[in-house]
Image (tube, grey):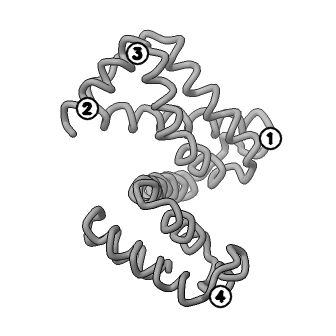
Amino acid sequence: METLLNDFISDVNDRSEEAFKQLYDAFYRELVYFSTKMNNSLQDSEDIVHDTILSIWESDYKFENIKYLKSFLHTSVRNRTLNFMKREGRLTNDFSSIDKKLREERIESDIIETEVISILNMAISELPSECKKIMTLLINGYSCSEIAIIKNLASSTVRAQKKRGLSLLKNKLPKDILLLLYTMV
């Protein structure tokens, strides 16, 4: 795993087109969610994230490892989102120190939340097809009964796939994220 990540970072630093497709696939949803939490506009957030990834492609930034890349992406998206909000008049520079601190805490919380969602989505994406679909719907707040109706399945089938999904994820997720998953489904 470590070697794959190092190769990926090396390819990003070399501006490999394939690496940037992988970067886009791996972080796009997480970053759009993060930006949308700040500005409440999905369309604007999608543009901000797209522009951020494009700016990395066009730049000469180099990253030591995946941690630095993720930090850079989140910081860039945060700054671009805040600048966008300022330009749109939805944010002023007149923050009191308390407001600023609260915003920073919210941003840190949002970063953690988006990383947890990313880890969950990555683990769920590795599940078998039907199991993945059902677990995704469960994460999105649908009940087993609602999923049975949506997917035209028996409720017992949905419950069995849920049980299977949780069992498979138990081996893939850290315990704290697994506990969070159990509270969500």
Q: Mark 1: which amino acid? A: Gly
Residue on which the image places disc 2: 4
Name the mark nearer the viewer: 2 or 3: 2
- Give the CA separation, mark 4 to mark 3: 49 Å
Give the residue displayed 60% in from the left and 51% down from the top.
33
The local crowd at label 2, few if under 14, some if 14 to 19, many if 20 or more residues have their Cα within 10 Å, is: few
- Give the CA separation, mark 4 to mark 2: 40 Å
- Give the CA separation, mark 1 to mark 2: 43 Å
Q: Quadrant of the N terminus?
A: top left
Q: Earlier in the sequence, mark 1 or mark 2?
A: 2
Is residue 128 toward the left or the right of residue 6 in the image?
right
Q: Position of residue 143 (x, y in %)?
A: 62, 84
Q: Earlier in the sequence, mark 1 or mark 3?
A: 3
Q: Earlier in the sequence, mark 4 or mark 2?
A: 2
Q: Position of residue 166 (x, y in %)?
A: 38, 75
Contact? badges 2 and 3 (CB < 8 Å): no
Residue on which the image places disc 1: 89
Name the mark nearer the viewer: 4 or 3: 4
Along the line of sight, which residue is nearer the eye, 52 or 126? 126
Q: Position of residue 144 (x, y in %)?
A: 59, 85
> Tag 4's secondary structure?
helix
Contact? badges 4 and 3 (CB < 8 Å): no
Along the line of sight, which residue is nearer the eye, 89 or 170? 170
> Tag 3's secondary structure?
loop
**Does residue 105 appear in the picture of this structure?**
no
Give the residue displayed 41% in from the left and 81% down from the top.
163
Q: Earlier in the sequence, mark 2 or mark 3?
A: 2
Residue on which the image places disc 4: 145
